[in-house]
Amino acid sequence: MSIALNTIDGLGLGAISGTTVASRVKAYRESAGYSIEDLAVTCGLANSEIAAIEDGTDADPAKLRRIAAALQVPVSALLTTDS
């Protein structure tokens, strides 16, 4: 799965792999010392929604914005490509 990012926060990005986003979310979560449950409570999502994002099956832009805010990182940190 790839994610079209041209509408997320006006970043003007192309597409990024869902697995890349998933691994970044997990890495930022772990570096913040959060469990999936902790992050879910902090950003107001269900545990299953966080798990779906981290396994690459969901990449809802609204959820990614909430996760980025909860982790105190810009959404671009989850979405920009390494070029």
Image (spheres, helix red, strand yellow):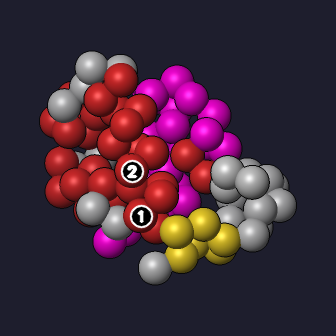
Q: Residues within 10 Å of mark 2 (few under 14, many from 20)?
A: some
Residue at position x 39%, y 55% in the image: 22
User: Does the magenta portion include 66?
Assistant: yes
Q: Are marks 2 and 1 in contact (CB under 8 Å)?
A: yes
| 82 over 2 or under it: above or below | above
Distance CA(mark 2)–CA(mark 1):
6 Å
Q: Which mark is residue 19?
A: 1
- What's the mark number on residue 23? 2
Q: Is residue 58 left or right of residue 12?
A: left
Quarter placement of the C terminus:
bottom right
Query: Where residue 59 sits: x, y (%)?
Result: 45, 64
Instruction: Determine whether the residue tagged by mark 2 lies in a helix, strand or loop.
Output: helix
Which span of residues is magenta-colored?
57-77
Dominant secondary structure, magenta: helix
**Residue 54 counted in the magenta span:** no
Residue 15: percent from left, percent from top = 66, 71
